[in-house]
Image: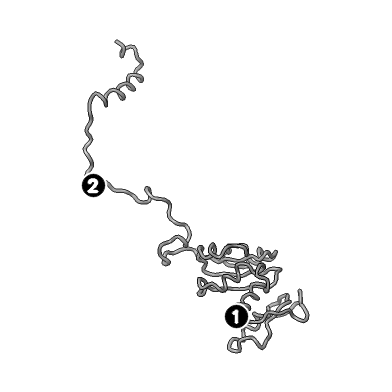
Amino acid sequence: MLYAQLPLMTLFHLLIIIVPFTFPLTIPPLPSSRITLIPALFSEPGPTNPSSMDTPSTPYTPLTILIDHSDSYTSSLSTLFTSKPLILPHTTPLSSIRSLHPTALVLGPGPGSVHNSTDAGVSSLILSSPSFAGTPILGVCLGHQLLARSLNLTVSPLPLAVHGVPVTVDGQGWQRYNSWHVPEQELPSAEPEVKAGMRA
């Protein structure tokens, strides 16, 4: 009589609770051949950058890192690349840059001195690290001076600094900004094209 007075949904709930305890159920195990696990649904998300990949042959997007030495021109410089580089401050730990496995490095400009380790920051460590021995490295302004220092060349102030003087290089007009240089007698004779670069 009690059940007859209960709403249908409540009676259904009671059956769910009572039936399993009244009638023991035996569920046979599925054969192992019928069980298929999908790893992607049962594991943590995979790595998204090359630093965590097991094999260096895994394809990924090439990464260019531009080191910013606190210079206002760095942002404008980044727009000249075919693919936008990742801009990191010169205070970034070397281990962090190494973990990103960059395919190219650009040591950017800066208002500091090539002879000041604080101004150079991580760029000096990059140039002396075996980890980047095979990585293409471009230097701009202060970054280029640091490249010269890494080759044991002398970087010294020009007798007369040049700022904003129009010049023509390879038929194209440029504005010349020079305040430091490498003495010409120190430049490698086997690579005369470096001469323009060291004085740029």
Colour approach in the figure: one colour
Q: Is mark 2 on a helix, strand or loop?
A: helix
Q: Which residue is drawn at 37% across and 48% down?
A: 42
Q: Where is residue 179 shown, x and y percent of the image?
A: 73, 76
Q: Residue 151 carries which label?
A: 1
Q: Where is residue 169 shown, x and y percent of the image?
A: 68, 80
Q: What residue type is labelled 1?
A: Leu
- Furthest-top residue in this view: 1
Identify the residue position indicated by label 2 in the image. Answer: 32
Q: What element carries label 1?
A: loop
The quarter holding residue 84 reads bottom right
Q: Where is residue 16 shown, x and y percent of the image?
A: 31, 25
Q: Is residue 184 above or below residue 80?
A: below
Report the side of 159 relative to 9 (left or right).
right
Q: How far apart are marks 1 and 2 (CA)?
A: 64 Å
> How many circles with numbers are drawn on the protein?
2
Q: Residue at x 26, y 25 (%)?
A: 21
Between 183 and 60, the one lying in front of the other is 183
Q: Residue at x 31, y 24 (%)?
A: 17
Callout 1: 10 Å neighbours few (<14), some, many (20+)? few
The quarter holding residue 56 reads bottom left
Give whichever of discs 1 and 2 has the lower sequence position: 2
Between 173 and 187, the one lying in front of the other is 187
Report the side of 144 relative to 129 (left or right).
right
User: The N terminus is located in which quarter?
Assistant: top left
Report the side of 40 relative to 125 (left or right).
left
Which of the two discs, 1 and 2, sits closer to the camera?
1
Q: What residue type is labelled 2?
A: Ser
Q: In this view, does 4 lie above or below 93?
A: above
The quarter holding residue 85 reads bottom right
Q: Residue at x 52, y 72 (%)?
A: 132
User: The C terminus is located in which quarter?
Assistant: bottom right
